Image (tube, grey):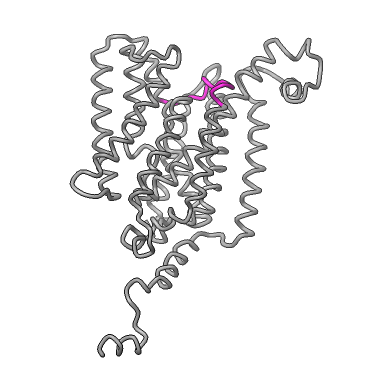
Amino acid sequence: MGLRHKMQRGDKPVLGKRPSTDKTLSQRLTTGVFHGIPAYLCAVVLLLVVLVGSVLFAVTVGSADLTVRQVYEVILFEWFHIGDPATLAQGAVHDIVWYIRLPRIVLGVAVGMGLATVGVVMQAVVQNPLADPYILGISSGASLGATAAILLGIGAFGSNSVGVCAFLGALGVSFAVIGLSHLGGRATPVKLVLAGVALSSVCSAISNFIVYVADDPGRFMTVTFWLMGSLAGAEWESNGVIVLVVLLAIAFFLTQSRTLNLMLLGDDTAITLGTNLRRYRQVYLVVASLVVGFVVYASGVIGFVGLMIPHVIRVLFGVDHRKLLPLSALAGGIFLVWADVVARTILPNAELPIGILISIVGAPAFVLLLVKKTYQFGGRPS
């Protein structure tokens, strides 16, 4: 009688509270300055136009004094075979445009898109708006691999030993983070962060020890410059792999937008909706680590992109990952292209490591966001 009486009064079991939960999720997803599909589509088109324009401009900028006509004559010849092969298929102008400038610009777009996308995913995985691709120790793992390859000669990969060892270090740390987070019970966002911080400290300590005991100033300078990040080593062969990996990762995470949105509500709420986030969190962490590993392989350690770009897009368009992922990817590509342009031109006859430049420009802006609290994560002021 008691149960029937309650049902007659309209009460529902706990699992029947999905409408209120969906309403809560919907409210969190509608944060941001701009709302609606038209605003989102306009933003996508605008960012695509800006990205293409940035690439077309960046290829004309550099320390070599080349005219715009010289630059695009080479590009048109390589793409459409327009022009005289005797003058456009070889020479200093051809090599500068086709083998130096354009590959590094393409790499910059791929690296920026990859880091920004992984930043979005990491922040959802650990439910922390201050997370980025490196907070879980991936950066320190890559640094340890690179340091070992350069100073100790570890690795049998020829000229690619540094990049391959950095990739293996990043991937190894990602699996170690997953393993440590499961010790003593199921993995949680807090345990993932703590495991990442612990492994980051260990990897940094080992890297510093290697640098200390290896008395080789020349190789030490190589390690230092590589850890600062640079796009100078871009090549068409490796670019193809990096671009493919980044695009596949973006496509994969776009298919996971609903699950990433559920992560904003927490594990307990997601379970009531029939989704166990633990398995998804592991998969996302591995895929994100693979992306960072390939990026590190090609460009060294470049930080901050995955931390700052998602915050800016989230403030403008909210936390819905269906919008956040593609917009962050496009904005990340644009950001890194322009950062590389400045890095190549700010010093006469020299190149400023792009990691230093991004930190100098981005850190004050990030601090300003923290002070003003003008961003939100999961609909909650941070």
Spot occupied by residue 318 in the image (x, y as percentages of width and height): 49, 57
* As drawn, 9 above or below 237: below
Residue 224 colored in magenta in the image: no
Name the quadrant of the C terminus. Answer: bottom left
In this view, 316 is above or below 22: above
Tally of marks: 0
User: x and y percent of residue 93 in the render?
Assistant: 69, 15
Between residues 371 and 219, which one lies in front from this camera angle?
219
Q: Could you tell me which quadrant the N terminus lies in?
A: bottom left
Pick whichever, 31 or 247, lies toward us: 247
Q: Quadrant of residue 240?
A: top right
Identify the magenta region: 228-239
**Image-based side of 331 in relation to 95, left or right:** left
- Taking the magenta stretch, the answer to whether it contains residue 234 is yes
The residue drawn where x is 46% and y is 67% is 27
Left or right: 115 as drawn, with respect to 169: right
Q: Is residue 36 above or below residue 231?
A: below
| Residue 370 position in % (x across, y down) | 38, 50
Instruction: Examine the image and state in which quarter residue 4 appears.
Output: bottom left
Q: Residue furthest left?
A: 184
Whole-percent x, y for residue 53 in the image: 67, 37
- Viewer-side residue, 268 vs 219: 268
Residue found 30% across the figure and 49% down from its top: 189
Q: Is residue 152 above or below residue 299?
A: above
